């Protein structure tokens, strides 16, 4: 049985649930109540119950959820049981940090190829990841069956490099540049705008604190 | 006149509008239609008009919005005209990258102090930012009137360091660790969970692409 399409807001919370359940499982915990779960992941328990109901995972009253069952379910849902290779384009400061960032923690995601124009790092291995020249983008993405790329180039190059990535078959872009890149309708962009996040935090502190 | 409290979803878009308007202004553009704005920032024009109406900024039919007027308005709203100092706690790979990250682009935000326990970098200047030992946290935050901190410590230290930061007066935390940190009700947390973002992107590609 394939799970029905779930709402976006629910989908966004899945990796959070997953990571917490994994922590519980590793600690040997057998079951968890929606109240405990709620406190840990900071999502109210009514929302958790609703989220879980999309998967037919209904906790038993007075027992809660079986950690291992839930975990197996999420693993399947999030494809944690198969490895997804992703590319990183732009090995500057942020790119370097992301090569070292432990994306694999509880996820089966791995940066398997990096790309840059800097001749001093092209054809070297940085933090365990090979750095290829940009003109090998299409070839490497095809060979490694990669269709997701992390974009960490300077803003002036962001659109041009995006166009190249899409021509090379990229279908999902995690965009760390502040540019709102233009992509065809069949390409998905996840914007991670750090300056925007920080600005929003400060704005809220200034306007909404008691 | 003080603007009324605006909805969260609108507040989240303000920095995006601001950055784009700033680009237009620097390029010498005098006015912009909501359609143009909509295409550039990828927010539909009805939403833009509604967002702007919270500030009493009503575009003129057939003219659009005056770029400089809008920009001045946003500057005031986002406090772009005063500098906000923030701290960075944890100068590892990601911390280093963030010290180099150009938060100031169009924002008046500056990382003015970093903190770490690593004796080899404590009391040095990294990417222009002084790195203090953790036991100077309270003193430095008070002296520099900082109440916002970026948290980039290893996950095992995240809660302990959060508690220290809050004891030192921090009211807003930009949390880059995958831990959902516990904070008092008067402290605001902005979670930036990069593994989660990437996982969500992959999930969407697997389930929602045509």
Image: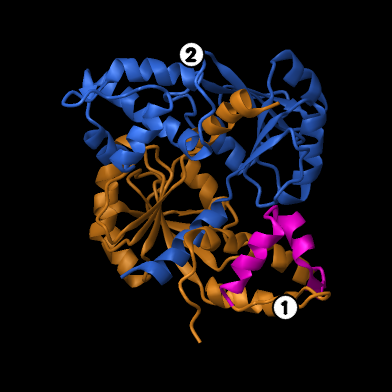
Chain colours: A blue, B orange
Q: Which residue is mark 2?
A: A81
> What chain is tagged by disc 2?
A
Q: In the rendered image, is residue A131 in sight?
A: yes
Left or right, residue A174 beside residue A51: right
Q: State yes or no: residue A197 in magenta.
A: no
For mark 1, does the 10 Å Cα neighbourhood hold few (<14), some (14 to 19), or many (20 or more) residues?
Answer: some
Identify the residue at horizontal 48%, vertical 13% (top origin): A81
Q: In the rendered image, is residue B127 in sight?
A: no
Q: Quadrant of residue B62?
A: bottom right
> What chain is tagged by disc 1?
B
Left or right, residue A77 beside residue A122: left
Q: Which residue is mark 1?
A: B68
Span shown in magenta:
B27-55
Q: State yes or no: residue B36 in magenta.
A: yes
Q: What SS does tag 2 mark?
A: loop
Left or right, residue A36 beside residue B36: left
Q: What SS does tag 1 mark?
A: helix
Which percent across, then down, holds residue A51? Answer: 40, 33
Identify the residue at horizontal 46%, vertical 40% (top origin): B193
Front-lying residue, B197 or A139:
B197
Q: Is residue B150 above or below residue A133?
A: below
For mark 2, does the 10 Å Cα neighbourhood hold few (<14), some (14 to 19), or many (20 or more) residues?
Answer: few
Q: Looking at the rendering, in which quadrant would you find the C terminus of chain B?
A: top right
Same chain? Circles 2 and 1: no
Q: Quadrant of residue B132?
A: bottom left
Front-lying residue, B43 or B90:
B43
Task: Determine the CA span between mark 2 and mark 1.
Answer: 52 Å
């Amino acid at each position: 049985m394939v799970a029905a399409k779930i709402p976006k807001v629910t989908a966004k919370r899945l990796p959070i649930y997953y990571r917490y359940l994994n922590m519980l499982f590793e600690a040997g915990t057998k079951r968890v109540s929606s109240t405990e779960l709620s406190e840990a992941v900071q999502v109210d328990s009514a929302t958790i119950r609703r989220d879980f109901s999309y998967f037919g995972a209904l906790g038993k009253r007075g027992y809660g959820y079986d950690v291992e069952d839930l975990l197996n379910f999420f693993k399947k849902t999030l494809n944690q049981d198969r490895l997804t290779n992703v590319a990183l384009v732009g090995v500057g400061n942020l790119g370097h940090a992301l090569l070292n960032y432990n994306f694999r923690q509880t996820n089966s995601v791995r940066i398997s190829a990096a790309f840059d124009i800097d001749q001093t790092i092209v054809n070297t291995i940085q933090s365990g990841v090979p750095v290829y020249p940009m003109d090998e983008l299409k070839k490497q993405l095809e060979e490694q069956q990669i269709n997701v790329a992390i974009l960490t180039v300077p803003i002036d190059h962001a659109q041009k490099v995006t166009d190249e990535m899409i021509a090379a078959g990229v279908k999902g872009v995690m965009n760390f540049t502040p540019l709102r890149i233009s992509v065809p309708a069949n390409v998905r962009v996840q914007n991670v705008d750090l300056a925007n996040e920080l600005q929003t935090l400060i704005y809220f502190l200034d306007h909404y604190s008691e």
